[in-house]
Image: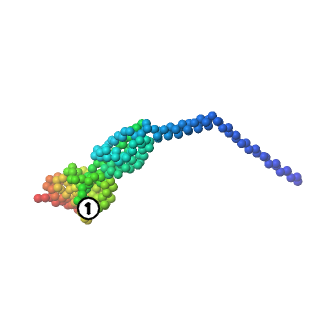
Amino acid sequence: MQRRPASTPVTRRRHHKHYKVNIKRLALALLLMSLTAELVWAAFTSPYLYVKNKKVTGNVTVSTSEILGRLAISPKTNIFRVRARNARARLLRNPVISDVELHRSLPSTLIVNVTERTTDFMLSCRGKLYEIDSTDVPFRMAKQVDPHMSIVYCDFSGIVLGKQITDSSFVNASKCLILAREKHIPQVVKIAVDQNGDLCLNVSDGFEIRLGRPERLAEKLGIAAKMLNQYPELRQRGGYINITCVEAPAFKLND
């Protein structure tokens, strides 16, 4: 038997692609890059783009002069060199200010839009009075109680203006106020938390709602709202509702 000759391997030729450099296109690209760099440099150095005007909006209680002082933009500052994050951080050091937005209006005006905190209720703690916003942040000391505001009475330490309060007694009292509003209990004058953490809510006519431990608050306040609606004489004569035990609410009227 004759063997077949081994097949001769086929040599494959590799075809190399040859690229031609387009001198004109390359020169044009380099020229455009150079022009762009010059424009950027001019934008960051031109006196035409110095911050010459500063406009402050949204401030009510914080003066414009204080805001501009905290902004701390030196003369001959290019409008594109204003670091919004740093400027915003400086302004937020004022606890009354909750948010800041900076906008550039070319060629030379910087617009500062300020959002201030507003008082949701007040806090009396260890002989000091604070204004509290809706996020439980104390932002300003007060000299006297605002008769149109609800006030929370607590006893704890470590209050820092501009920092959210996390003390459990205060958090429970704040939650109680929110739930009282949701249950349409009108004219909440004060909420007091005693040394044991028990809650007591007072309405404008001196009527008390004793809630006890801060457990099942929504249910307790729902019962209180229903009793006040069903028995209007409760508020007319004064006294209290005791809902420390949800299963056995009770009330007492003044003589």
Name the quadrant containing residue 246: bottom left
- Give the percent coordinates (x, y) of residue 203: 20, 54
CA neighbours of label 1 inside 10 A, class few (<14), some (14 to 19), many (20+): some
Q: Residue furthest left?
A: 255
Above or below — where is 126 with respect to 63? below
- Give the percent coordinates (x, y) of residue 132: 28, 53
- Give the percent coordinates (x, y) of residue 143: 22, 53
Q: Which residue is the site of mark 1?
A: 155
The colour style of the image is: rainbow
Name the quadrant containing residue 57: top left
Is residue 150 visible in the rendered image? The answer is no
In the depicted view, which residue is nearer to us: 234 or 170?
170
> Which residue is at a point 33% across and 55% down the rendered structure image?
163
Q: Residue furthest right?
A: 1
> Which residue is at a point 78% across and 46% down the rendered structure image?
11
> Which residue is at a point 83% across and 51% down the rendered structure image?
6
In the depicted view, which residue is nearer to us: 92 or 182?
92
Q: Secondary structure at mark 1?
A: loop
Task: Identify the amino acid type marked 1.
Answer: Asp
- Give the percent coordinates (x, y) of residue 46: 45, 38
Q: Residue furthest bottom?
A: 196
